[in-house]
Amino acid sequence: MVVWKRSIRFGYTLAWSLFVLVLRLLVFVPLVIWLTVVLARRVPNPFLTLVVIGFAYGVMLAIGHQKLWVAAWDGNSPSLGGNLEGVLVPGLEAVVFRTSAFFSSLMTGTLVGAVVGLVAWAIERAAVMTRRARKLHP
C-alpha cells in the first residue's frame, strides 16, 4: 500500500514538473526569439521595436483571455466581495472584470516588451562599445 501511494505521488510530481516546464517554455522562449531577431536584424531602435512587439503580444494575450474566460472560470465568473458585494448588477460586474483583464493584458504585454527592449538596448550598447574599443586599440 505504501508503494502505491509513493507511485501516485511520483506520477503527480512528474506531471506537475512537466506542466511547469511547458509553462516556462511558453513564457521565455518567445522573449528569447524576439530578442534574438531584433539583435540579429540590427534594427535602428530595438527598445521601441520591442515595445511595439510587446503591445501586439498584449493584444493577443487579451483576446486569448477573453476567448477562454468562461473555460478559465468554469462558469463561475469572479464577483465583487466585501463592501462592494451586490452593489453592481452581475452583468455589469462581468463587464468591469473583463475590461480590467483586457487592459491588464495590454499593460503586461507592453511592459514585457519594454523590459526585453531594455535588455536589447543594453546588449546593443555593449556591442557598440566593444567595437569602438577594438577600433581604438587593435
Image (cartoon, rainbow, N blue to C red):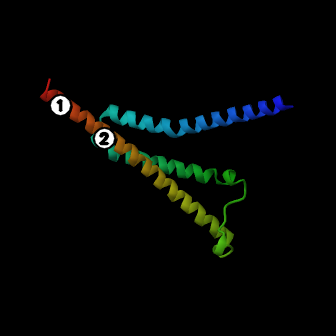
**Residue 52 seen anywhere in this rendered image of the structure:** no
Task: Using the rendered view, name the quadrant where residue 79 is placed.
Answer: bottom right
Image quadrant containing the C terminus: top left
Tell me residue 61's x, y (percent): 53, 49
Name the amino acid type tagged 1. Ala
Upstream in the sequence, badge 1 or badge 2?
Answer: 2
Residue furthest toward the front?
2
Name the amino acid type tagged 2. Ala
Residue at x 17%, y 32% (from the top left corner): 132
**Residue 70 seen anywhere in this rendered image of the structure:** yes
Residue at x 72%, y 53% (from the top left corner): 74
Q: Secondary structure at mark 1?
A: helix
Residue labelled with disc 2: 122
Residue labelled with disc 1: 133
Task: Using the rendered view, name the quadrant where residue 122 is placed.
Answer: top left
> In screen coordinates, is 79 left or right of 112?
right
Tell me residue 134's x, y (percent): 18, 27
Q: Secondary structure at mark 2?
A: helix
Residue at x 64%, y 74% (from the top left corner): 84
Tell me residue 8's x, y (percent): 78, 33
> In screen coordinates, is 19 left or right of 56?
right
